[in-house]
Image (tube, grey):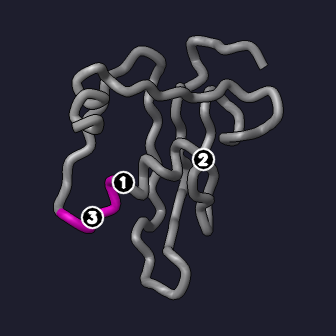
Amino acid sequence: MPLGAETPAVELDGVSFAYRGGPRVLEDVSLAVERGAFVGIAGPNGGGKTTLLRLALGLERPSEGAVRLHGAAPGARGAPGWGTCRSERSSRRRRR
């Protein structure tokens, strides 16, 4: 699927999630982030910020709803991937 300007870079549609045996951490979350946008996620401890990012990156699967990266499910064959890199500063801290 070609990346179009109308396709959000990250899209969560009616996403809910609970860790095994626990209460729901996220419930019916919908979010669209356009290509090139800068987004901040703020909230209290235990508010679901990290879980939201883990879902968006495909590290967790929602119990309900859909997650799409550039229009495709995270990890789907042929879907665009995400990469990370450590800054030189954080690499130096780990070596000490």
Residue 75 position by quadrant: top right
Identity, as a three-letter code, of the amino acid under mark 2: Gly
**Which portion, as a residue range, is magenta?**
45-49
Q: Which mark is residue 58?
A: 2
Report the quarter where the N terminus lies: top right
Disc 1 target residue: 50
Q: Please tell me which residue lies in front, 12 or 48.
A: 48
Q: Earlier in the sequence, mark 2 or mark 1?
A: 1
- Magenta-span inclusion, residue 27: no
Q: Mark 3 points at which residue?
A: 47
Mark 3 or 2, nearer chain start: 3
Residue found at the very far bottom of the displayed protein:
21
Q: What residue type is labelled 3?
A: Gly
Q: Which residue is drawn at 26% across and 30% down?
A: 90
Q: Which residue type does callout 1 highlight? A: Thr
Q: How far apart are marks 3 and 2 (CA)?
A: 19 Å
Q: Tell whether 66 sits left or right of 39.
A: right
Residue at x-position 54% and y-position 42%: 57
